Structures are given as C-alpha cells and as structure tokens.
Image: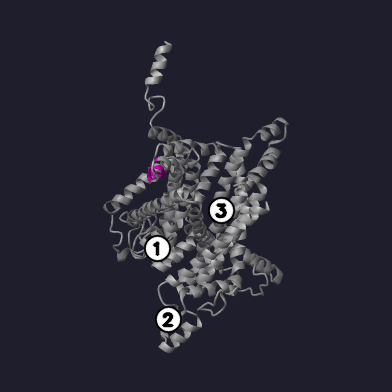
Amino acid sequence: MTDTTSNEGQGAPVDGPERPGQLREFWFYFRENRGAVIGLWIFAVFAFLALFGPWIAPHDPTAQARDFTLLPPAWQEGGSWTYVLGTDPLGRDMLSRLIVGARYSFFVGVVVVTVAASGGIIIGLLTGFAPKWVDSIIMRVMDIILAFPSLLLALVLVAILGPSLTNAMIAIAIVLQPHYVRLTRASVMSELQKDYVTSARVAGAGLGRLMFVTVLPNCLAPIIVQAALSFSTAILDAAALGFLGMGAQPPTPEWGTMLAEAREFILRAWWVVTFPGLAILVTVLAINLMGDGLRDALDPKLKRS
Amino acid sequence: MLNYVLSRLLTFVPTFIGVTLISFMFIRLLPGDPIIVMAGERGVSPERYAELSAQFGYDRPVYVQFFEYLGGVLQGDLGTSFVTKRPVWDEFFTLFPATLELSICAMIFAVALGLPAGVIAAVNRGKFFDRALMSTALVGYSMPIFWWALLLIIVFSGNLQWTPVSGRIDLLYYFPDPTGFMLIDSIASGQKGAFLSAVRHLVLPTIVLGTIPLAVIARQTRSAMLEVLGEDYIRTARSKGLSPARINGIHALRNALIPVITVIGLSVGTLLAGAILTETIFSWPGIGKWMVDSIFRRDYPVVQGGLLLIAVMVMIVNLTVDMLYGVINPKIRKR
C-alpha cells in the first residue's frame, strides 16, 4: 500500500492532477472573480466590434442623412427604428459611429500597450542588469518624465508632432512607458537576489539568456496586470486628447472626438453626448474589472488585501 | 534621518535640470518659427526679423540659450507671454489660486467621501455595502471625466437649472481679489449673495475633479483597513471589549491612514491633469485652461514656463510626501 503511493508520487509528472497546468490554474482563480468574467465578456464584444465593426454597422458611419439631423433615439418621440440611437448634428447614424468607433479605441489600447510595454520592459531589464551609473541615469530620466502630469505631457507632445490619432498614440506610449520601466526594474532587482539566477549564472548562461529566459518570465505577473490597467488609461487619454481636439480628427468616429463635436448640442440633444461617453465608460470599466481579476489570479499575495 | 533627507534632496537637482531642459527643448521642437508667430498676419521684414531674433536670443547657439534660460529660471524669470506681453511668472501666479482653490475643494470632497466609504466597505467586507461601494468606486475610477462633466451639466445646469455652466462667479459681482480665492474674497467683499454665487460655480467642477481621487482613496482606504484589521493588536482590542466604533475608528483607521496619505499626496499630478479637462469644460480661469489655450495659441514662452512650473510643483509635492513617509515609517529610510 505504502509502496504504491510512493511510486505514484515519484512517477507522477509535475503537472499531474495534483498540480494543474499554469493556464488552468490561472483560469481557476480568474473565474472566481465574477466581475472579471463579466469584464472579459464585455471586452470580447468590444474586440469583436473592433474587428468587424464596418460590416456590422447598419449604416455608413460618415454618410450624412441631411433630412434626419439630430433625430432622437427610436424609443423617444420623433425617433425612428432606422436610426436606433438617433443621429448626430450632421445626420450621421449614432449607432454605426459607435460601433465603428470601437476599433479606434481598441487600436489605441493595443498599440500603446505594445509600444510602452516592450520599450519599458527592455529598458527596465537593462537598468536591472547594467552598472549602477547607467541605472541612475535611466531612472533620473524616468523621474523627469513622471514629473509632468501625463495628460499635459501628451498634449504638448501632440502639439509638437501635430494633432492626429497616431501622434496621440505615440505621445501616450511615451508617457506610460516609465511605469513599465520602474515595475520591471523592481522585479528584476528582487529576482536577481534569488538562488536560481545565481545557479543559472554558474551554469554558464550568457547575459541575453539570463535576461530574457531566466529572469524575465518570473517578472511578468505584475507587468501583465499593469498592461491591462494601461490599456484602459490609453483609451481614456486618447479620448481626452480627441475631446481637446488633439487626437483623432473629425470625421473619424472616435468616441472622444465625437464628444467634442457634440459639445455644443448638450442641452438640446442628450443622446449625442451620452452614448459616446457611455461607450468609453463601459469599455474602460470592463478592462479595469479584468485587470482586477488578472491581479487576483496572477498575484495571490495581493489577493488577500 | 538627515542623510535620508539630503540624499532625497540631491536627486532633486538633476531631475530639476532635466525638467528645465525638456520644457526648453519642447519649444524648440514645436513647428513654426516663434518670431513669425509673434509677428502675426502682417508678417515681418528681414531686418526686423534679425532684430527680434537678437532681442530674444534666438540667433545664439542652443546650449547658450539653454544656460541663459536656466539662469533666468533660477532668478524667477520665465520669459514674457507673446499674447498678453506679461511675464509668465506673473500670469502663472495670478491664475494659480483658481486652480488651487478648485483642487483643494476637490480633494476635500474626495477625502470626505472616500475615507468613510473605504472604512465602511472594509468593515462590511464581502457584504452588500462593500460590493455596492466598491463597484461604485470602480465606475468612478473608470470615468472619462470630460464626459462626466457634460452629464452633470445636462442634469444640474440644463434640466434643473441649479448651477451655472462656466466661470467662477456671476458677472453681477465685482470686488478686489487680494487672496485670489473666490470663496474667501467674496466673503471679504461683504456683497450679498457673492459667496453663494461662488459656491454654486464651484460645485460641479469640484465633483468632476474629485471623482477619480475619490475612487482611488476609497479603494486604497479599504485595502489598507483590511490589512490593519487582520493585525494582532486589533484582536487584542476586540478581546478587551472595546466598542467596534472605537476599534475601527481609532485603532485601525489611524494606522491605515499612512498609505492613504501617500496616495493623497501622490495624486497631485493626477489632479493637475484632471484640472486641464475640468477647467477647459467649465471655462475655469486656472492654469489648466491657461496651458491648453496657450498650446492652441502657440504662445511658446507660456507653454514652456507653465510646463516647468507645473512639473516643479509636482516634484516638490512628491518629495515632501516621500520625506514625510520616511518620518512616519522608518523602514523606508533604509532603502
């Protein structure tokens, strides 16, 4: 009896039934957080609209129906089911614009997070491994960027580069990058103290291998959480820049730009203001919910607090 | 302790020079020649161009210009606005009280609601109140505040007609503003209804600017409280038979406040970023709106000076918070 158990214990692979695969374990914890799962579903819808928006939208988002300007939503008096969420001051269908607008926000999130995270991770790794003076210089530069309020810095950067969605994305990526550098550096520093790194070094691992294969995978958990959070920050900031006229330019149906165009009509037509903002809020909320779930699942230490 | 303070102060110097360099460089990178912009529609003759460019020092090498600028900055000379022809320094400090007043009110609003919300959520962990409060906090945290401002305007200014849409006070009232704080000056003026008008102008911007800090403070207070509530001395206090109000309000909250105060201090940057949007929407004559307007007007000295002053302000506040944190929590100093 005892023999069999010990045999089984020895023979069982590490990822046997006692220790499920990493992905399964992650999903197990993620699923516990109901808000996170709801967030994931909303995000899935958002991603779907971003990918297939133009084929789903009932109308052309830039086509102007001049006879139907500022039409209220269908359920209100004077509304029509042809334009379910009403039309804007130029007679463009609100619903179509919102659906097609999803892709701009999604695009902003993906590009900004990719650029900021990859740049930040590489710089963070370098500072962690580099001699102290290099580390000090890079960290001072990051302090300098962090001293400026992010939106203000992005605004000035866009003023230099010229107002457009691409430049807004570049500006936001630059502004968000220091957070990744700090985060990566901090986890690299704490990982470097550990024995497995020393043994890898003793075994003759080169610098590149140490950085990317040995240390980096163990630093990823907080970075992934940060990526989720900065996805939402990027969407908010891009919308804010669009709202100030420094992001996507009309007639692009970007949600922030739509709000800017609708501003003068706020007291006459509530729907042109309400829906684009609601779209931003719901998307950002869904991503933040997911971020909380990711944090719980990836970082059990934080979970208790 | 002294060593800690000195080492923190030492890192301030290179960051300050860097911030100056960046705000200086930005202006050199902006498209358009500042002198052409200054000359406006009429254009400028080549002789006048050379004269102006010598006057502003644009004909000298960039590094010379930078050191002159740095020297000027250290003596409080940030240049002169192209548009108003007033020193940037004076403009900043004329408008700054408006932003400060709004920020202080927003912070009071955020703390006054956020702290109790966080405590109530922590004490009722997992129950209805906790879930309701934390869901609300997450919505607030995800809020695009420029949209939130428009919604509040629709409801409170449009439908209910309770609050004005823009400005700091009704045009009816005019009085000297020695402090620059409308709430104080309106009382000092002794004019009937002036204070009430100032308050009504302040309500919506305060709510808008305070929403995100409110959500952050509520979330942070909750998690700090939860951590403290698990400590042994809380169990001791409970077993001594102290009332829950005393345990939560005095024993726990006091210790939970340390991280919360840090969050409050560090949100100054967020507050200023929020002020840009809030002031633009409510036409609030503060530095946020001033910066946005100057960017659109290509008023280079103002953008440059304003950027620098705002960054230095954020740095000073962060440094102070850092040091206070070191005073409160000796463990930090060792790092």
Residue B192 image position (x, y, % from top left): 69, 70
Q: SS at mark 3?
A: helix
User: In the image, what residue type sits under mark 1?
Assistant: Gly
Q: SS at mark 1?
A: loop
Chain at numbered mark 2: B
Which residue is identified by label 3?
A: B213
Residue A298 image position (x, y, % from top left): 45, 38
Classed neighbour count for the residue bearing mark 3: other residues with Cα under 10 Å, few (<14), some (14–19), many (≥20): many
Segment colored magenta:
A208-213
Q: Nearer the viewer, mark 2 or mark 1?
A: 2
**Label 2 – label 3 distance at C-alpha:** 42 Å
Same subunit, tags 1 and 3: no
User: In the image, what residue type sits under mark 2?
Assistant: Ile
Classed neighbour count for the residue bearing mark 2: other residues with Cα under 10 Å, few (<14), some (14–19), many (≥20): few
Chain at numbered mark 1: A
Rendered image: mark on residue B36: 2
Residue A21 image position (x, y, % from top left): 38, 31
Q: SS at mark 2?
A: helix
Asked whether residue A21 is drawn in magenta, I would say no
Residue A116 image position (x, y, % from top left): 41, 53
Q: Residue at x 58, y 75 (%)?
A: B77
Chain at numbered mark 3: B
Q: Nearer the viewer, mark 2 or mark 3?
A: 2
Q: Residue furthest top?
A: A1
Question: Quarter holding the C terminus of chain A?
Answer: top right
Q: Residue at x 70, y 30 (%)?
A: B239
Rendered image: mark on residue A139: none
Rendered image: mark on residue A247: 1
Question: Quarter holding the N terminus of chain A?
Answer: top left
